[in-house]
Each structure stands twice: as structure tokens, then as C-alpha cells.
């Protein structure tokens, strides 16, 4: 049962037991100071115990001034011990860990203390224009990607994912709908590709030969005048492959347009809506490819692999709703799965409200309480109190 899904795959030195990927998903478990917390470790370990073979840990900021609070950071050596504790726990439970290197551009504006960096001048009101980053800043950020990659190696990660999608800074440079520069970083696709390619080279130079490099990419932009087409994305992916990317993780969605809905597709978006784009990119680049977006049953995932559309599949929210999703489907217990219903209430919606502490799930009340530390400490305290009162 589900033979394709449960066939192993090797990418450079990384041996994976099956074809399902737990993708990067921001959790807000890292709190105000962007360090790894016990909550974040418990959450990942629960999914490894539930069968996950590769946990790509969420977005991690590479550049301190633009790092928003509540999101993980890898922008300084001080974060390495916490990250090491996380990878040790994932390894001890039998899993593999990746980290997603991130500079969030406009998105970091959710934290007013974080510096916003944009690819080119961006008017936000009749009076205010955010200036596009300078060539000096470009060099600084590229160096930050390299330094973050070196920290990821030191922290024990098995692979790295370069975030080049969702309107964040590398995608913003790549997209003609966002990048309006007139220097050598703007205009033609080759020029717009210069910044992301420089980041990729900086990462590759700082990781061992055997370590795989994944890249999250949008198949194309949506609702964005002059935005990326798949005909541009395909040659860019080929350039990225030549620069050292091994695996394409094909997503969709950009936060400055209605295309946002494709990033974490809700219930009204058809299941596997983006898979034919991923299949085309794979066919035309010949690169290992992950299909992404509302693939939430084993039957659908197996069919996609049987049709040879992609090499692996992201099953993200499926594993938020049920941490034991993979073990259950491996054992053929599909009836026992608590399925993600695509409501986005709790998980993705938590980013719309800065007062919400961390992600939760409509279907899984235990999300964020994988090890009920508070409960036990309260129980112990109350037992001690009872003993005293007798
Ligand atoms: C709570 C939440 C946080 C997310 N954070 C990230 C992120 O940090 N980086 C990223 O590339 N995508 C992020 N995504 C998108 C997921 O990686 C994934 O592409 C998306 O949920 C679609 O896959 P699914 O239908 O299997 O859940 C997030 C999604 C959710 C639900
Ligand atoms: S909150 Fe809804 S969309 Fe998010 S993981 Fe849970 S069931 Fe799925």
C-alpha cells in the first residue's frame, strides 16, 4: 500500500525513508527573542515520532536588523546552541532536519522594530516611499546568507532550504512585478536573477559538498502586473541548479496581491492545484522536485507519484492536524487519520493577529502542547499544596 510514497530517496548524502516532506511552517513557538524553545522542539519531535522523515524547520532570519520577533533567527552565533538542541532532538527521534533561510522583505513589517528591506523603491503612501536596498546592502545580505548557512552546518542541520518565494527579498528581486530597479539588478531576467543566485552561491560555498540545498520557489506570480511567469521561472530554476540547488520545492503565492491565497491554500482551492506547474518545471529542468499545496490524503499523494509528476510531496497541514499522519497511513490506517480540513483557523490565521501567541489547529487541540509541561508542573504543584493542607 502506498508503495511510491514509502520508497526511499537519496539526495547527495541525505537518505530519506519516504517521499513526504514536513515543509517550513512558521509556528511563533520561538517567542519574542527568536530562540529555539522547548515547545518548538516538542512539536518537531512529535512529528518525527509520527513518521516524518524530513522536517524543514520554519523560516529563520539571516539578517539581525530585519529579523522580526516571534520568528526563529539564525542571524547570529548566539542562536547556534538552541538550534543544535533542536537538531539533536530530531536526530535522536530518528528524523532529519532542514532549516529555511529567510529575509522577509515587507513581511517583517508585522514587527515594527524590524527593518524593512525592499528590492526597489516602493511607494506606500503619497508621502512615503521605502527606498530600494543599495548595492552595499545587497552585498551585506548575500554575506548574511553565507554566514547563516555556515551556522546551520554547525548546528547540525542535514539540509538547507533557500526561501526564494512568497514575495520575500530574493523573490522580490526575481519578479519583474516587484523589482523596478534600473541598475544591473533590475530589467532582464538575468539581471533580476543576480541577487538570488548570489545568495545561492554564498550558501553553497559555506556548506559541505554532501549537504543538499533545496529552494522554495513560486511556480509563477498571481494577480501581479509584470510578475513572474512560469516561462521565466523555468530558466531561473536551471540557473539555480547550476549554482548549486539540488531540489525545487514548488509553491505559489505572493503577499502583496490576492495571490496570497495560494501560499496556504484554503478549502475552496482545489486539492493539488499547483501540481501540474511543478511537473512542468521538473520536466523542463530535469531537477528533483517537490509538489506542494493541499495534498492531504495518502491516496492523492500516491496518485501524484504514480503519475510521475514530482519526486516528493509536501504534506504540511496534514501533519499539523495529525502528528501521527505518516505512521497511520504507512500502516494502512487511513480511517484513523484526523484530516486537515483546510480551514486555516488556528494555523495560518494566527499570523493575522499579533496578539495570538502561536499556531494552533482546529482539528488538533494538542498542537503546541505536545508535551504538557505546564499541565504537569501545575499538577505537581497542586498535589504538593494538597499534601500541605492535610
Ligand atoms: C502555519 C503555517 C506557517 C507557514 N510558514 C511557512 C514558512 O515558514 N515558509 C514557507 O515557505 N511556507 C510556509 N507555509 C506554507 C507551507 O510550507 C505549505 O507550503 C503550505 O501550507 C501548503 O502545504 P499544505 O497544503 O500541505 O499545508 C506555512 C503554512 C502554514 C500553515
Ligand atoms: S487549523 Fe485547519 S487548515 Fe490549519 S492544520 Fe488545522 S485543520 Fe488544517
Image: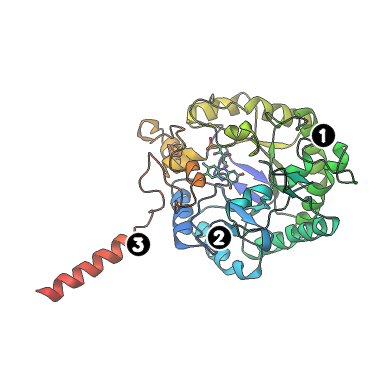
- The residue that disc 2 covers is 87
In the image, the residue with mark 1 has its CB under 8 Å from the nearest atom of ligand 1: no
Secondary-structure class at tag 2 = helix
281 or 383: nearer the viewer: 383
Going by the picture, which residue comes out furthest to the front? 127
Q: Nearer the viewer, residue 362 or 330?
A: 362
Classify 10 Å Cα crowding around label 2: few (below 14), some (14-19), many (20 and above): many
Quarter of the rendering occupied by the C terminus:
bottom left
Q: Where in the figure is residue 221, as x and y percent of width and height?
A: 70, 32
Q: Give the mark nearest the N terminus, 2 or 3.
A: 2
Q: Earlier in the sequence, mark 1 or mark 2?
A: 2
Residue depicted at x 64% and y 57%: 61
Q: For residue 203, which quarter of the picture?
A: bottom right
Q: Looking at the picture, how far across and down is residue 185, in whole percent? A: 86, 46
Whole-angstrom CA distance, mark 1 to mark 2, is 34 Å
Secondary structure at numbered mark 1 = helix
Q: Nearer the viewer, mark 2 or mark 3?
A: 3
- Helix or strand or loop: what does disc 3 sit on? helix
- Residue 153 visible? The answer is no
Query: Mark on residue 345?
Result: none
The crowd level at tag 3 (other Cα within 10 Å; few <14, some 14-19, many 20+) is few
Q: Residues within 10 Å of mark 1 (few under 14, many from 20)?
A: some
Residue position marked by numbered label 1 in the rendering: 235
Question: Left or right: 353 with respect to 209?
Answer: left
User: Residue 376's x, y, as percent?
Assistant: 29, 63
Q: CA distance from mark 3 to mark 1?
A: 49 Å
Q: Tell which quarter ligand 2 is in.
A: top left
Q: Residue at (15%, 70%) from the top-left corner?
A: 386
Question: In the figure, 195 relative to 377: above or below?
Answer: above
- The residue to which callout 3 is attached is 373
As drawn, the residue found furthest toward the bottom would be: 388
Amino acid at each position: 500500500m502506498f508503495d511510491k510514497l514509502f520508497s526511499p530517496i537519496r539526495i547527495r548524502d541525505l537518505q530519506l525513508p519516504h517521499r513526504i516532506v514536513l515543509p517550513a511552517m512558521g509556528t511563533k513557538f520561538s517567542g519574542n527573542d527568536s530562540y529555539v524553545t522547548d515547545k518548538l522542539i516538542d512539536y518537531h519531535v512529535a512529528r518525527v515520532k509520527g513518521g516524518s522523515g524530513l522536517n524543514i524547520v520554519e523560516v529563520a532570519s539571516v539578517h539581525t536588523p530585519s529579523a522580526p520577533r516571534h520568528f526563529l533567527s539564525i542571524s547570529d552565533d548566539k542562536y547556534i546552541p538552541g538550534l543544535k538542541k533542536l537538531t539533536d532532538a530530531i536526530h535522536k527521534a530518528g528524523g532529519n532536519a532542514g532549516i529555511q533561510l529567510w529575509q522577509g522583505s515587507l513581511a517583517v513589517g508585522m514587527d515594527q522594530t524590524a527593518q524593512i528591506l525592499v528590492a526597489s523603491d516602493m511607494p506606500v503612501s503619497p508621502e512615503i516611499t521605502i527606498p530600494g536596498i543599495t548595492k552595499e546592502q545587497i552585498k551585506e545580505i548575500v554575506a548574511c546568507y553565507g554566514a547563516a548557512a555556515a551556522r546551520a552546518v554547525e548546528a547540525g542541520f542535514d539540509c538547507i532550504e533557500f526561501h526564494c518565494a512568497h514575495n520575500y527579498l530574493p523573490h522580490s528581486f526575481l519578479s519583474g512585478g516587484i523589482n523596478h530597479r534600473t541598475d544591473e539588478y533590475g530589467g532582464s531576467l538575468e539581471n533580476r536573477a543576480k541577487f538570488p543566485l548570489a545568495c545561492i552561491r554564498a550558501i553553497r560555498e559555506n556548506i559541505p559538498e554532501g549537504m543538499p540545498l533545496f529552494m522554495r520557489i513560486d511556480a509563477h506570480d498571481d494577480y501581479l502586473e509584470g510578475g513572474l511567469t512560469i516561462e521565466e521561472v523555468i530558466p531561473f530554476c536551471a540557473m539555480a541548479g547550476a549554482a548549486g540547488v539540488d531540489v525545487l520545492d514548488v509553491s505559489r503565492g505572493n503577499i502583496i496581491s490576492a495571490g496570497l491565497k495560494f501560499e496556504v491554500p484554503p478549502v475552496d482551492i482545489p486539492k493539488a492545484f499547483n501540481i501540474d506547474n511543478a511537473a512542468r518545471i521538473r520536466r523542463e529542468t530535469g531537477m528533483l522536485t517537490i509538489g506542494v499545496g493541499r495534498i492531504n490524503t495518502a491516496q492523492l499523494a500516491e496518485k501524484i507519484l504514480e503519475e510521475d509528476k514530482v519526486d516528493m510531496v509536501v504534506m504540511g497541514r496534514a501533519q499539523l492536524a495529525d502528528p501521527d499522519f505518516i505512521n497511520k497511513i504507512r500502516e494502512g490506517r487511513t480511517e484513523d487519520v484526523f484530516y486537515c480540513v483546510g480551514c486555516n483557523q488556528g494555523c495560518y490565521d494566527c499570523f493575522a493577529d499579533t496578539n495570538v501567541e502561536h499556531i494552533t489547529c482546529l482539528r488538533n487541540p494538542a498542537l503546541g502542547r505536545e508535551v504538557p509541561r505546564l499541565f504537569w508542573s501545575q499538577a505537581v504543584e497542586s498535589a504538593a499544596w494538597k499534601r500541605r493542607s492535610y
